[in-house]
Image: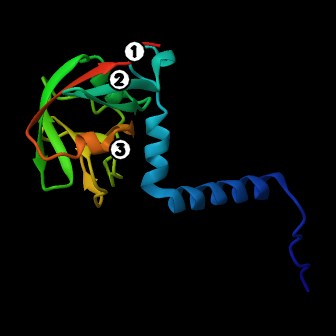
Amino acid sequence: MKNAPSLSWHPSRHRTSMLLASACLALAVGIPGALVAWAASDTSSVPSKEFPMKIRLVVGEQVATATLYDNPTAKDFASLLPLSLTLTDYDTIERVSDLPRKLSTQGAPEGMAPAAGELTHYAPWGNLAIFIKPRAYSRSLLPLGKVDEGLSILSRPGPYKVRIERVEP
């Protein structure tokens, strides 16, 4: 009769267990985990010490503030600032505007499910989209940042002018 295999600790079993646990965690986290990893990436020429970057969105005499994420697309957006845009209502849940050019999608996730207040870039159209309400997952929608204060200022139906600029430290 053969001896039963030993279940004691062994380096190769431990390594296999750790790899299996990591794979399960990656599957459980899925796309949100990929967004977190990508949002923290630093592959742009803009110095990382400037990120996360605070910005202001000025509508008439009112000011909303937001924070840009530390990712290549947000850094590319920051390189365009200051910007004067006209925001229009799109499907009552977002305010959109064309940008002077499409932004970098280097290392970007395939898409996202934006929350209310999320600043995003819709890659196929090359526009800025600020979400007033949450939305289901959308392919090619990339995270730029999040409104900190003043979402109600941006919630008015468009069109209206907005100036987006850096908040100097």
Give the numbered dot on residue 46.
1
Residue type, mark 1 in image? Val
> What's the CA distance linking mark 2 and mark 3?
15 Å
- Residue at 77% in and 59% down: 13
Depth check, front residue: 41 or 2: 41
Q: Which is closer to the viewer, label 2 or label 3? A: 2
Depth check, front residue: 141 or 17: 141
> What's the CA distance linking mark 1 and mark 2?
6 Å
Query: How many numbered discs sit on the rendered protein?
Result: 3
Looking at this view, name the residue that lies furthest to the bottom. Answer: 1
Depth check, front residue: 118 or 100: 118
N-terminal-most mark, 3 or 1: 1
N-terminal-most mark, 2 or 3: 2
Residue 58 image position (x, y, % from top left): 25, 26
Are dots 1 and 2 in contact, CB under 8 Å? Answer: yes
Residue type, mark 3 in image? Pro
The answer, for residue 91, to whether it is visible in the render is: yes
- Residue at 44% in and 38% down: 38
Q: Is residue 107 above or below residue 17?
A: above
Are dots 2 and 3 in contact, CB under 8 Å? Answer: no
Q: Which residue is mark 2?
A: 75
Q: Secondary structure at mark 1?
A: loop
Residue type, mark 2 in image? Lys
Tell me the quarter of the picture where residue 130 sits. top left
Number of other residues with Cα within 10 Å of mark 1, as a class: few under 14, some 14 to 19, many 20 or more:
some
Residue 55 image position (x, y, % from top left): 36, 24
